[in-house]
């Protein structure tokens, strides 16, 4: 019985590993494309590609679950605005002006915000193991971002772009919490298709407004390759895995996996930018993985009286 109950949790935890990898690439590509493709243009066409890729698989469950969409319209719309429209648009806008180190540091506040908002607004209990694991993994993030030199923390300068990125982190925290309010009987692939469709309706006037103000993209091979990556991996696959993972393990545990983004970012930097790993990378990665493992352990059941 217990094995059958633990299996969905284990699958949910495994599904939460790829999204941070894909989102680490999202930050790298978003920062690299800032001079070629305007942020709202990048966000709009990313979701167009994602919608085209997902629609053949999502169309049938979307038609079947249409009555459920209508019954839960408010829940679906608010999650879509927070996690699909606002989060990505704010990230791309903020990356126009903020450094990569600042973006990583701000991104690591997401698990803290999820636990904080969950406790304050939804009365979700916080276990001591979760708090300790969160603190341990956050210390690992700081170690990587600060290159093992804690004095760098005082030297960080923050810009208006950092405020924009932090607003994106708040949006994602609420998106994670609001996903749990959407009934589980709604098919997650169909839900993802419906959310992307709604997001495109909201992003279209923003994209056209950006073009009207003279912000035109430079379409070349690199730009098309970037859009292809953004449209498939951090959009369709990452969101789908994350949505299923949140449904299976809960918002607080799922949010902890966001701390894997700098881990994968360091690995991607070695593979594609030919950077070298340092001892502080190993220490930071070990702290992040240990913190996540500590926080996702199932709570001990009290012995019956």
Image (spheres, rainbow, N blue to C red):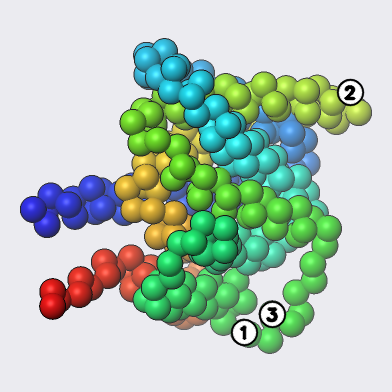
Q: Is residue 111 visible?
A: no
Q: Residues within 10 Å of mark 3 (few under 14, many from 20)?
A: few
Q: Which tag, 2 or 3, sits closer to the chain's start? A: 3
Q: Nearer the viewer, mark 3 or mark 1?
A: 3
- Say the numbered circle drawn on residue 133: none
Q: Residues within 10 Å of mark 2 (few under 14, many from 20)?
A: few
Distance in Å between CA atoms under marks 2 and 3 = 40 Å
**Residue where numbered disc 1 is placed:** 149
Q: CA distance from mark 3 to mark 1?
A: 8 Å
Question: What residue is shown at x 67% (from left), y 41% (from top)?
Answer: 86
Residue 249 horizontal/vertical position (percent): 34, 53
Q: Do we see residue 163 in this rendering?
A: yes
Pick the front one: 200 or 23: 200
Image quarter of the C terminus: bottom left
- Residue that appears at 38% across and 53% down: 250
Q: Around disc 1, counting alpha carbons within 10 Å, would you say few (fewer than 14), some (14 to 19), or many (20 or more)? A: few
Q: Which residue is mark 2?
A: 212
Q: Is residue 303 left or right of residue 86?
A: left
Q: Is residue 303 left or right of residue 159?
A: left
Q: Secondary structure at mark 3?
A: helix
Is 29 left or right of 60, judged from the image as shown? right
Q: Secondary structure at mark 1?
A: loop
Name the N-terminal-most of marks 1 and 2. 1
Q: Which mark is residue 153?
A: 3
Please state the horizontal and vertical placement of residue 4, each as a whole percent of the image: 12, 49
Q: Please state the horizontal and vertical placement of residue 130, each as a whole percent of the image.
A: 40, 72
Q: Residue at x 51, y 40 (%)?
A: 234
């Amino acid at each position: 019985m217990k094995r059958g109950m633990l299996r969905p949790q284990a699958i949910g935890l495994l599904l939460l590993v790829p999204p941070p990898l894909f989102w680490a690439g999202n930050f790298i590509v978003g920062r690299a494309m800032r001079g070629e493709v305007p942020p709202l243009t990048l966000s709009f066409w990313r979701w167009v590609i994602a919608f085209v890729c997902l629609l053949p698989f999502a169309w049938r469950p979307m038609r079947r679950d249409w009555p459920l969409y209508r019954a839960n319209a408010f829940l679906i719309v608010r999650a879509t605005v927070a996690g699909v429209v606002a989060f990505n648009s704010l990230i791309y806008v903020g990356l126009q002006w903020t450094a990569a180190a600042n973006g990583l540091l701000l991104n690591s506040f997401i698990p803290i915000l999820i636990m904080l908002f969950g406790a304050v607004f939804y009365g979700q209990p916080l276990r001591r193991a979760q708090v300790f694991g969160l603190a341990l993994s956050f210390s690992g993030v700081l170690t990587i971002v600060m290159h093992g030199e804690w004095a760098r923390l005082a030297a960080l300068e923050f810009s208006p772009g950092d405020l924009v990125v932090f607003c994106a982190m708040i949006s994602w925290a609420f998106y994670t919490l609001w996903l749990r309010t959407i009934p589980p009987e709604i098919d997650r692939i169909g839900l993802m298709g419906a959310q992307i469709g709604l997001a495109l309706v909201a992003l279209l006037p923003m994209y056209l407004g950006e073009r009207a103000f003279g912000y035109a993209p430079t379409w070349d091979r690199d730009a098309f390759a970037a859009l292809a990556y953004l449209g498939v991996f951090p959009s369709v696959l990452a969101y789908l895995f994350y949505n299923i993972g949140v449904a299976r393990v809960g918002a607080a545990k799922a949010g902890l996996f966001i701390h894997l983004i700098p881990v994968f970012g360091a690995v991607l930097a070695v593979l594609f930018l030919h950077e070298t790993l340092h001892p502080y990378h190993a220490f930071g990665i070990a702290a992040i993985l240990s913190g996540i493992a500590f926080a996702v352990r199932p709570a001990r059941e009290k012995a019956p009286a």
